Image (cartoon, rainbow, N blue to C red):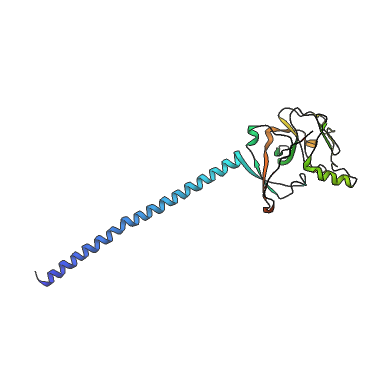
Amino acid sequence: MNSQQHNEDSNQQSEVIDGSVLNTSGPADAKKGGRAYKEIVDWIKALAIAVILVFVIRTFLFSPFIVEGPSMEPNFYTGERLIVNKLIFKMREPHHGEVVVFHVPDQGRDFIKRVIGVPGDTIKVVGDDVFINEQKVDEPYIKEAIESAHANGELYNTGPDFPNANVSESVVPDGKIFAMGDHRGNSQDSRDIGFVSEKEIIGRADAMFWPLNKISIIKHYKVHW
């Protein structure tokens, strides 16, 4: 074998070796591409699951609510953001003193008020005195506000008494509640719109998450009489 042929054979061998190296890069690139595709699919699945969870939670469990208006002062103020528990009243009936959010079909909006009367209760409101079944109610959630008004020689409740010309029935019917705002002189509530159907109750306000300096679990006072 002469030197020229040896060189040609060597070159041919080199080319084969080089070719084999180049060919092995194809499956590696494919493997990387497959891994990237799998990661994208996993991200899409994770996002889809997150969206479904948010939908389920907001539809059936919890929902945010923004307070608008002064009707629940001094306990809740405009702009505060609350978490409403939508599940609790599917398991039991509302209790006296609980803060609830409900829909008012005639007005096409939601109200936040406090439960004063439940089915079977006889309700009477005279000035700052609230009576359930002829027994005067102790309302700790507005006690200081009432005392402050009285110290100035004023009534805290400058709104309507109950029953009245708008709502003459005093006994809470089955499947309904009697609700009032804490700001008795500036609240449109059951004294005006009548008893609230339990079917329209969205849920109970359970936590405040805005503003940040007021993050807290909402206290639901028991009404005593």
Q: Is residue 42 left or right of residue 85?
A: left
Q: In which quadrant of the rendered view does residue 145 lie? A: top right
Q: Position of residue 125 (x, y in %)?
A: 83, 35
Q: Position of residue 216 (x, y in %)?
A: 67, 47
Q: Position of residue 175 (x, y in %)?
A: 71, 29
Q: In which quadrant of the rendered view does residue 196 lie? A: top right
Q: Is residue 3 left or right of residue 149?
A: left
Report the residue at 62% width, 42% height from top: 62
Nearest the eye: 93 or 49: 93
Q: Position of residue 14 (x, y in %)?
A: 21, 66
Q: In which quadrant of the rendered view does residue 179 lie? A: top right
Q: How many marks?
A: 0
Considering every residue shown, the one lying at the far bottom of the view is 3
Report the residue at 69% width, 35% height from top: 200
Quadrant location, the C terminus: top right
Report the residue at 35% width, 54% height from top: 31
Report the residue at 51% width, 48% height from top: 47
Considering every residue shown, the one lying at the far left of the view is 1
